[in-house]
Amino acid sequence: MNKKMIISSYSYGLFIILMIFAFLTALPIFLLSHLWSKKPRVYFQKVVQQYFRLFYKLMPLIGKITVINRDIANRYHPCIYVSNHQSSMDYTLLSTIIDDYTTTANHPISDFPLFLKFPKNGLGIYYIPKGNLTKANIGYESLKKALKLNSSVILFPEGTRNQTSELKKFKGATFRLAIDTQLPIIPIVISGTGKIVTKGSNITKTLQKKDIIISFLEPIYPNKDDKFLELSKRTRNIMQEYMNTL
């Protein structure tokens, strides 16, 4: 077994062990919080957030994690966070910073059956299979409902992990959501995660520590008369211009 496989096995094993402890710790808090809170998911997320942070501290390939404009995160709550997508690490990284959110995934979180129904009920992750229009519409309405309940939304409008520095065309539903709810878009640019693990492989690409930069950009405010494709292009251009400076 080569070094990359050993480090990858360690990382995935560490993640599974920490998630088991996270689940066992968060579950009773989640259940009890139903007694006083309309959003018990927030308590579940808070516990899991601490385990995600511990995971990144123990990960051997993670160098320095720099958050630029951290003060923007959670300031405009509720809002729609729009991020580029390089790696399976992106969601867990953002969840170490962002509080009280929902998001979507086009595969069950799992690949990890431990959480069962808790991806949606506990972590706020809505599973939307690719090409399933009915599920997509249900997911869209669920996100709108979450925003009305004062929760933010994290979305990756490229729709898939991208191995290049050129952003893919953004999916329009994200920006229709912003126009429908009249809530700000907070662009996020993540750099470095794609150098560690990328699409198509669970094996690390490197044996060297890689630094990660997470940049929160200034909010973009939609207008009722905006066209979602134009808003999509405007957001993408802002993010691409920023990525070109990294």
Image: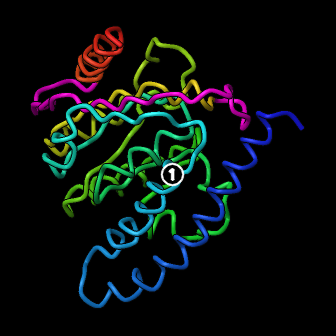
Residue 30 drawn above or below residue 238? below
**Does the magenta portion include 219?**
yes
| Main SS, magenta residues | loop
Quadrant of res 205: top right
**Does the magenta portion include 208?**
yes
Look at mark 1 in the image and give the residue it sits on.
Answer: 135
Amino acid type for the residue under numbered disc 1:
Lys
Quadrant of res 198: top right
Seen at 25% across and 58% down, the residue is 151
Seen at 42% across and 52% down, the residue is 139
- Residue situated in front as seen by the camera: 135 or 105: 105
Residue 173 drawn above or below residue 24? above
Q: Position of residue 29 (x, y in %)?
A: 40, 83
Name the element at disc 1: helix
The answer to whether 11 appears left or right of 158 in the picture is right
The image's colouring method is: rainbow
Seen at 21% across and 24% down, the residue is 227
Q: Position of residue 41 (x, y in %)?
A: 36, 70
Write the start and end of the magenta stretch as one range.
Answer: 199-228
The answer to whether 102 appears left or right of 182 in the picture is right
The answer to whether 14 appears left or right of 178 in the picture is right
Q: Position of residue 22 (x, y in %)?
A: 52, 70
Q: How many marks?
A: 1
The quadrant of the picture occupied by the N terminus is: top right
Furthest residue toward right: 1
Q: Position of residue 187 (x, y in %)?
A: 27, 30
The quadrant of the picture occupied by the C terminus is: top left
- Residue situated in front as seen by the camera: 122 or 128: 122
The crowding category of the residue bearing disc 1, from other C-alpha atoms within 10 Å (few below 14, some 14 to 19, many at least 20), is some
Seen at 33% across and 76% down, the residue is 40
Residue 16 drawn above or below residue 32? above
